[in-house]
Each structure stands twice: as structure tokens, then as C-alpha cells.
Image (tube, rainbow, N blue to C red):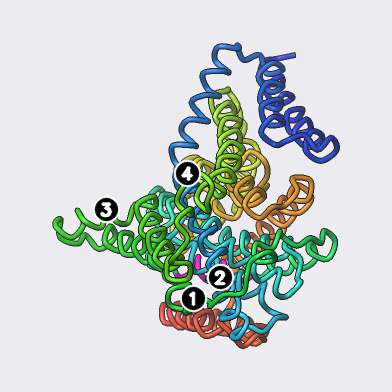
Amino acid sequence: MSSNTLVILGLILAVVVLVICTVKFKIHPFFALIATTVVFAVISGMGMEDMLSAFTSGMGSTVADIGLVIALGTVTGALLEKSGAAETMAKTILKITGEKHAALGLAITGYFVSIPVFCDSAFVLLSPIAKRLANDTKISMTTMAIALCMGLHATHMFVPPTPGPLAVSGILNADLGQVILFGALVSIPVMLVGYFGAQLAGKKYYYLPKDASENQEEHELPSPLMAFLPILAPIALMLVKTIGDMCAWPASIMGVMDILGTPAVALMVGLLIAVIGYHQIFPNDKTAWGFDGVFAEALRTAGQIVLIVGAGGAFSGVLKASPLQDILTNAFSGLTIGILAPFLIGFLFRTCVGSATIAMVTAATMIVPLLDILGFASPMGRIIAMLACAAGGMMVFHGNDDFFWVTASTSEMETATAYKTIPLISVLQSLTALACVFGSELDLPALTVCSYLVKILRVRFYTGPVCVIIKIYARHVESRR
């Protein structure tokens, strides 16, 4: 066999080993990922020294990137649960949505939150609300977790200033304002497909998370302001930093915001607010911050999550260090099949390498010389090409992606359940996005399409912001005709 064939075979067998270890034998994901990495390295012909170097580098960079975020977010979540803040937030959301549509409320919340905030950080922040809603409504945590995850996933892929779509827009020289409008529009059906998929998955794989309030004494609940502030403050800080970067604010202001808007610092601010809220409810609890209190219990949980996510990053690091990326690049360098070219490139790189950003950027880089040949040289064509890159980069979302393990571990979901649901729903989201991009390429009348989309959005809560996006987009497109 050629070396290229061995690399592809190694990838296929590695994924099979990962699925068998986690789904059939219920092996802890940390050790399953180590076994998977070794299988890929051996079969692909990678030397052990190279494998170990890539493994430790990948794990180290992943833990450095999101390890502190997970730890801070987990401790904040524990404080919100113990103080009753999660219960207050859940009751507030239920007043708006009703029990029947609680999961849709989470999906739409994820849709908006993921625009300024990374998926990983946002899921860790919002998971206490999802758990509380699941326990209060008795809706499966599978539904809640996947609805939130896929809501975050939708705008993360399509709407700048998230790094992936922002980078692709720059590479393809697409108009950023139109990319934001079109990306926000495409993300709506993509988010809804994720929500409907979450509902079906929840019916088949039903479970409820451990209720932290079961053994607690009755006590006064925090106010809605103190309940939501530990989550809203970090989001606001990160959003302001993002806006400042785009608008080129004065250096004196940006010097402060570059620090406060960094995810770890922003989450630390949220943690401090959560500490104040917890102290207001339990002023006599002197053990909360020690080795036997809330902090210690949360950090024990965070440690396991960090190891699992780090092992996922290590597997991804080994894949990136192998010739896999070059093999895929060479295989698709001469592809001239219209809109399917960027879609297929993004799909293969996301499935094989695991990074959505790498998938999108690689697809965009490869089709830049082919924009004229593929028919994407016009301003609108560049936007369509960007959306096609992102649509392909949505699938297949599985165990070589850090966010997969953040979702499964933080939501207490069995790895087998995660593998049976999340990859399939990501495929449905990707195909939905591709269909939307085809609609844009066919130049369907914007007002007609958008009016129909508004009509099928029958749920009343939260539709105001969504419909505003749709109407702005429709008027913008029609005005350019």
C-alpha cells in the first residue's frame, strides 16, 4: 500500500476504534482517545516520537486555550446551582417560553450568544440553565444539551466576528456586512433543524441530569439580576471587545477591553459576581472556598472535563501533524464542480481534522484561484462561496472536535448517546445550510422567501429579534436589485 492509502486507512480505523471503545465497551473517553490516537499513528506509519510530540503539543495547546475557561465556568456553574441562581434563571425563561418550548428558548439563546462568544465558553456558561430546565420540565437533558449545542454551532459557523467566518470572508474578499446578514439568515433554519433533531434525540435517549437541589435545604432564591449577571457580564465584556476590534476604538479604551474581554478574564469577572451572589444567600458558609466546599467539588468535575477535552485536542493535533491535510489538499486541488467544491472540501477537512475553522479556511484558500472558473467572482458570488465553505465545515461534528467533548462532559451525557446523536444532527444542519446556499445561488426573490420563513416561525417568544434579522436582510437584498 502507498503511504497516502495507509494514512486514510489509519483515519478510518481510528474513528472505528473510538466509536467501539466509547459506545460498545463504555471505556472512559480519555483512554479511548489515547487508544484511537495510537491506532492512527501506527497504521499511518507515523513514528512514535513524532506521535508523542504531536500528542503532547495538541493536548497542551488545547488545555492552555480552554482549560482555564472550563475550570472558571464549572466553578461559576456550581455556585449558580448551589445558590439557586440556576433555578431563578430557569423560572424566568419558562415564564417567557412556557415549558413546551423551553428547549427552543435555549437554542435561540445559543444562536445569539455564540456570535460574540466561543462555543466552548458559552456552553459551559449556559449548561447550568439547561440542567435546571431539564429537571424542572422533565424534558430530556439530551434535548436541552443538543438544542443549546446546535444553536451555538449555527452562528459559530456563519456569522462574523467568530474567527472562522471572519477569516473566510477576508480570504474571499467578501463584503463583511452582507456576510453577517446572509450568515445570520442561513443560521436560522440551521438552528431550527438542530432544535428539531434535539427533540427527536431526546425522545429516544431520555435522561435527566443529577439535580443538585434535591438534598438542599429550602432557602431564599437570588433575584433575576444577580442570577443572570454572572453570565451576562462575561458575554457583554467579550462582545464589547469584539465590537472595539472591528470599529478601531482608541488605544486607551482597547487596552482595557483587550484585557477584560479575554474569555478567561471575562469569566473571572462572572465568577466574582457569582461569589457575591452565593455569599448573599449563604453568608455563614465559610467552607465554600476551601478544599471541602463548592469550589473543590466543582474543580474535581472540571479536572475530568479538561482531561477529556485535552485528549480530544491531542488526537486532533496528531491528525494535523500527519500528511492527511496535504493528501486532502492535493486530492481536491483541481475540483471544478461549482458550489459543491467548497462544500466538499470543508466537509472532508471538518470530518477528518476536527477543526471547523481549519475546514472553512482551507476550503476558502483552495477555491480563491478558482473563483472565476466556479462562477463566484461577483460580490454576491463571493458571499455564496463563503457560505458554502461554512456549510461544508459543519459536518461531521464528532469526537475529534473539542466542542463535542465539552458538550458531552458538561451535560453529563453518555459518550455513546453523544456519538449516536450529535454527528447525525450536524449532517442535517450542514445539508440544510447547503440547501439555503443553493437558494441564494438561484437568486430566489428575497421578500417572498423571507415572508414564508416568518410565517412558519409560529412560536411567539424570541421571534422578534429573529424576524427583524429576516426583514432587514430581505429589504437589503431587494434594494440591491
Magenta stretch encompasses residue 188:
yes
Which label lies toward us, 1 or 3? 1
Q: Which residue is mark 4?
A: 66
- Crowding at label 3, few (<14), some or many (≥20) Cα neighbours within 10 Å? some
Label 1 sits on what residue type? Pro
**Boundaries of the magenta span:** 181-190
- Crowding at label 2, few (<14), some or many (≥20) Cα neighbours within 10 Å? many
Q: Residue at x 64, y 59 (%)?
A: 434
Quadrant where the N terminus lies? top right
Query: Looking at the magenta stretch, what is its main secondary structure?
Result: helix
Kindly check if marks 1 and 3 are in contact, taking CB atoms under 8 A apart as contact.
no
Q: Earlier in the sequence, mark 2 or mark 3?
A: 2
Q: Is residue 178 visible?
A: no
Q: Which residue is mark 1?
A: 222
Kindly check if marks 2 and 3 are in contact, taking CB atoms under 8 A apart as contact.
no
Q: Earlier in the sequence, mark 2 or mark 1?
A: 2
Q: Which residue is mark 3?
A: 258
Q: How many marks?
A: 4
Q: Earlier in the sequence, mark 4 or mark 1?
A: 4
Q: Which residue is mark 2?
A: 84
Label 2 sits on what residue type? Gly
Residue 58, percent across and down? 51, 30
- Crowding at label 4, few (<14), some or many (≥20) Cα neighbours within 10 Å? many
Quadrant where the C terminus lies? bottom left
Q: Secondary structure at mark 3?
A: helix
